Structure formats: C-alpha cells, structure tokens
Amino acid sequence: MHLNTSRENAPRIAQPGTLVIVWAALIGLLGLTIAVAKLHVTSWSVVLNLLIATGKAALVLVFFMHLRSESRFVKVMLGVTVAALTVIIILTFSDVWFRR
C-alpha cells in the first residue's frame, strides 16, 4: 500500500492573519445579529437574522472546516443540502406569512 505524501493533495490551511480577520468578521456579525434582534423590525428581523446566520455559517465552512480544499462531490452535496433547507424555510415562512 502506497501512501501519497505529496503536498498537492494536502488541504490548504489559511494563514493565521486570515483566521484572525475571519474571527473578527464573525464577532462583528454576532454584534449585528444582536442589534437586529434588539431593534424588533417586525417580521423582517427573522429574515435578516437568517441571512446573517447564513453568512456566518459560510465563513465557518470555508475557512475553519476547509471546504475550499474538499472534492467537488462534497461541495455539490453541500449545495443540494443548502438548497433543500432553503426550500423548506421558504415554504415555512410563506405558510406563516400568508395565513388568514
């Protein structure tokens, strides 16, 4: 059994400076989430917080879970999962918003 020890298949690790910037962005987005929740912008605060949470999840996936170095299959499966979740959330919101 031959183990491939070449650097071409090794995951690309982000530089410490990049990770600090991503961490600062996550902290900023957390503050934005808290601010939107305190403002009580009627029904739109939930949508805004979901969008902010999507951005935070994307940062974590790309930088801390090394999604950039994953295979195309993993990226496609993540896309399918996110699309299905998006459809479920949209259908749930449309049901709640358009009730009489």
Image (spheres, rainbow, N blue to C red):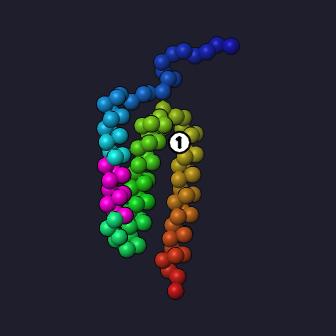
As for residue 36 lying within the magenta part, the answer is: yes
As for residue 49 lying within the magenta part, the answer is: no
Examine the rendered structure and indicate whether residue 81 appears above or below residue 45. Answer: above
At x 38%, y 70%, the residue is 44
- Residue 38 or residue 65, whichever sits in front: 38
Circle 1: element type: helix
At x 53%, y 49%, the residue is 79
Disc 1 crowd rating (10 Å Cα; few below 14, some 14-19, many 20+) is some
The residue that disc 1 covers is 75
Residue 50 image offset from top left, x and y in percent: 43, 60
At x 36%, y 46%, the residue is 26
Examine the rendered structure and indicate whether residue 29 appears above or below residue 1. Answer: below
Q: Is residue 35 left or right of residue 6?
A: left
Residue stretch in magenta: 28-37
- Residue 65 or residue 81, whichever sits in front: 65
Residue 75 image offset from top left, x and y in percent: 53, 42
Residue 78 image offset from top left, x and y in percent: 54, 46
Amino acid type of the residue that numbered disc 1 sits on in the rendered structure:
Lys
Q: Which quadrant would residue 22 be assigned to in this image? A: top left
Q: Is residue 48 left or right of residue 1?
A: left
Examine the rendered structure and indicate whether residue 61 appears above or below residue 4. Answer: below
Q: Is residue 38 left or right of residue 77?
A: left
Main SS class of the magenta portion in the image: helix
At x 44%, y 27%, the residue is 12
Q: Residue furthest top?
A: 2
Q: Which quarter of the image is occupied by the N terminus?
A: top right
Residue 27 image offset from top left, x and y in percent: 34, 46
Query: What is the tally of numbered marks visible in this picture?
Result: 1
